[in-house]
Amino acid sequence: NVQGECLIYYSDGENASSPIFVLPYQRTTLDIKMLGVREKVPFSTVIKTDHRVTATLIHYDKGNALGENFTNIKSTRWGIAEGFVSENTFDYLSLFNPNDYMVEVEIKLHPNPWNQGVINLRIDGKKRASLAVNDFIKKELYPFAYGITMESTGAIVASMSRYDNVFGDGMLFMAAPNFGEASGYIAQGSREEGSSEFLDFLNINDFGINLSVKIHYIDGISYITKYYIGHNQWASIKLTEDVITRKDIPYSLEYEATNANYWYPNQQAPVIANFIHAYEGNMEGVRFEQTPHRYWEFAEGFRESSKKAVVENLYIFNPSESYSTGNVTIYYDDGINPTVLPFKIAPYGKLSLLLNEVEKMRDTHSWGAISYGIRIDSNTGVIPYFVHKDTNMGGSFALNGTGWD
């Protein structure tokens, strides 16, 4: 059994706590309203337990669906490559200070719309702060695409949420700690009719970088495209127009960034990177996953009796030159009779599980639904990607999962 508490830290400095108790191998749900959380007051959430758990936050708001995994990372440097404001698009930056003391945060937009520099915030200990980015961009600059960096005097947590009236959905994703990494992976992409996919990169190094983007189609065909990004520059690649030429063939992708200076050939260079898949009524945005892991977990999974109102897919990419073998295990909300799905994935291949169509999974309970969590065990490091679409509540979201070795 796992015991602990769910801690709520409001933006006005108040806080609250609710106990947590979870049976072995059980997926459980905490309804924020049932916990008595105050309405219309922004808050941050901390989960503390006596054993390791995986946790996900799901937020539904007027036809928008947002989801993201909890993180155990705190950092003094965070970055987001995907920023966009317009008359119909609204970005919100959320920061949480988990320390017992006040921290100062310096926020920069790239490119800089003000000419003079930065936004400075002070956040008291155990308090949340938010920034409506639209309020800091003059409307004559709309539409304005940007990257954003944050540096603080103490370790904090940072995320970005978006509401888009054009696509009719929103998205939520954690910022990248330590200003990104030199390589990263996304397990699922697809050029479909009416869809748009973007890769966004922010290079805040004092030198230019060479960027290699590798596309691995599900039928085994792969190719590489290369780009140059100058120092302190933001760049966007529209996959569905500039890179992906084959329609309706799913793919995985990875990037690698190196120093473009002649004197430092092949020296790895960190870059902040994000991925977006959008189409009418749905937006799915995640940061690139930097490390393939042998073990992954997802706390979110839901099946209803019609198997049509909620659609969930799980993709697993094998970024290695050897076969990946293992199991996907589905753990249900009653803690009994898990479903085990063995897999074998070819080198640079991908497994696609349309979870609504998996016959081995258990039927819904008598009330018409069943919730579940997912665990992946593999003999080699893999990269997963989970998608949830809800036609009743509206919208969709994507998750990278929580991984370790």
Image (cartoon, rainbow, N blue to C red):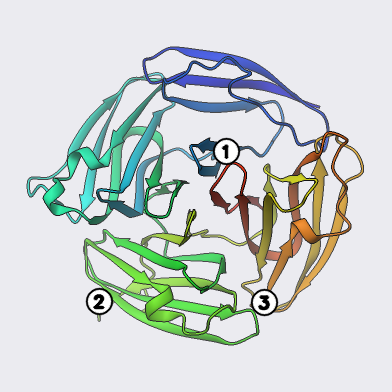
Residue 349, disc: 3
The extreme right residue here reads 337
Residue designated by label 1: 58
- Residue at horizontal 62 percent and vertical 51 percent from the top: 388
* Residue 380 picture location, percent across and down: 71, 66
Q: Quadrant of the N terminus?
A: top right
Residue 261, disc: 2
Mark closer to the chain start, 3 or 2: 2
Left or right, 395 with respect to 369, comes to left
Asked if residue 265 shows in the view, the reply is no
Of the residues tagged 1 and 2, which is closer to the observer? 1
Local secondary structure at mark 2: loop
Residue 133, disc: none
Left or right, 139 with respect to 224, comes to left
Q: Amino acid at mark 2?
A: Asn
Label 1 CA crowd tier, 10 Å (few <14, some 14–19, many 20+)? few
Q: Amino acid at mark 1?
A: Ile
